[in-house]
Image (cartoon, rainbow, N blue to C red):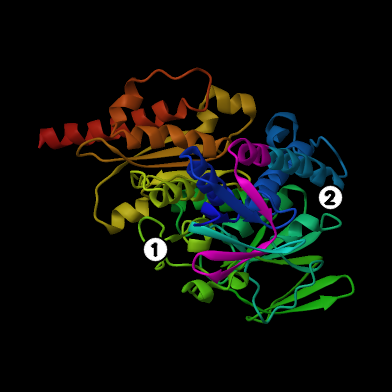
Amino acid sequence: MYDFDLLVIGTGPGGQKAAIAAAKLGKKVAVVEKRDMLGGVCINTGTIPSKTLREAVLYLTGLNQRELYGASYRVKEEITVADLGMRTQHVIGREVQVIRSQLSRNRVVMLQGTARFLDEHTVGVTGDEERKVTAEKIVIATGTSPARPPTVEFDDRTVIDSDAIMHLDRVPETLVVVGAGVIGIEYASMFAALGTKVTVVERRERMLEFCDLEIVEALKYHLRDLAVTFRFGESVAAVERRPRGALAILESGKKILADCVMYSAGRQGKTAELCLEAAGLAADDRGRIDVDENYATPVPHIYAVGDVIGFPALAATSMEQGRLAAQHACGEPVANMHELQPIGIYTIPEISFVGKSEDDLTRDKIPFEVGISRYRELARGQIIGDSYGMLKLLVSPDDRRLLGVHVFGTGATELVHIGQAVMGCGGTVDYLVNAVFNYPTLAESYKVAALDAMNKMRAIARLTDEF
């Protein structure tokens, strides 16, 4: 009756996992993707390029080694865009090969072109030729693109978004970043490490509001040490292009001259080309599609996953959403996604956390104790030259469960998963106190922080018993 059991529009993390999960269940599956965009935004313009750029910056600048070899230490004196792009293109090429191989060996049909709905079961694919395909079930996984304020004239050279920054012809000497969200702060830290004089303009009074305040303050201190200037409570009223760069004019009247102005104004769902109305669907003003707990849209046989459905808009959660949506579409038993989802922010240095923050617990009137371990007190921290990193545990004094884990510093996005595993299994701080960790490692910070929290709770208990 239909050409395919499941048709997936988009091959980003959510689309990949949806297609492969359905194929593993014996379904006839196809994916639609534009030419040269296999892997979606994640592989080609977003997550993978930016994180690879970060690694190239860390290596070439020698930033991580400066505590050991001096502030002037660099692997390469003059770092060019070609130096940075070489590693990025290599990784993108390898990742595309991996995805192509995965889809091929699972017999997923690849349709190259741009998809649009003709009706709720039919999709037109415009590529080298026009074709129509029908599917019993459809998954929308088109992702997002950088939001561009309509009042700003982007030229992709001096006034750019986070996609265009990967294609600059040179490393700017000065850079204004408009927006202190995750993407804005990640790029601000990378270019600051390269020696660019970065100014961050943010209309709110603080950055990364969903993160632990102490961790954010530590990051802010570190970025200021890299000569980043912050303008909080400020908005950009206008940007004027000049022969040599751009002039950012703030609403307060301040003027900032820079080689480049990068807007990081959130993301817009890539749904404009889909002709959703033909399938009986609609997107909101940010291009996002509404779904239920099974990622089904108001048209029950059409699902949507990944960034196109909004928060949390992470590659990791998108993968799981795709898998769960495909299982539900194929009539397989589905478990809900675990509520413990780690957040990783690839600034320099990294931030990662899972669970509640101090602000969350204080607002909800949940008592907690804090245990802290600082990298400078660990042998591994001294070996790698990281004296600023820290790990924080939030522990319930009532039942000793872990309520939150917050990490700042080298390897934060890897370390956080130890705490996630303990929390997910209902473990307590006692497990970390009694566990034996390899020495010397950064993972040992869990034991140090757990002992810190335990000693504080023991002191309070002793004092309470005396009275």
- Front position in the image: 108 or 50: 108
Tell me the number on the disc at residue 81: 2
* Secondary structure category for the residue under label 1: loop
Location of the C terminus by quadrant is top left
- 285 relative to 161 in the view: left or right: left
- Looking at the image, which residue is at 50% across and 64% down? 121
Q: Position of residue 183 (x, y in %)?
A: 61, 57
Could you tell whether 142 is left or right of 191 in the image? Answer: left
Q: Earlier in the sequence, mark 1 or mark 2?
A: 2
Relative vertical location of residue 11 with respect to residue 297 in this rendering, above or below: above
Residue located at (84% from left, 50% from top): 81
| Image vertical order of residue 50 relative to residue 282, above or below | above
- Amino acid bearing label 2: Val
Residue 207 seen in the current view: no
**Residue nearer the viewer, 424 or 40:** 40
Q: Is residue 438 above or below residue 178?
A: above
Q: Amino acid at mark 1?
A: Pro
The 10 Å Cα crowd at callout 1, few under 14, some 14 to 19, many 20 or more, is some
Let me know if residue 279 is in the magenta part: no
* Magenta-highlighted residues: 98-125
Find residue 300 and name its label: 1
Left or right: 14 in relation to 164: left
- Residue at the limit of the structure toward the left, as seen here: 467
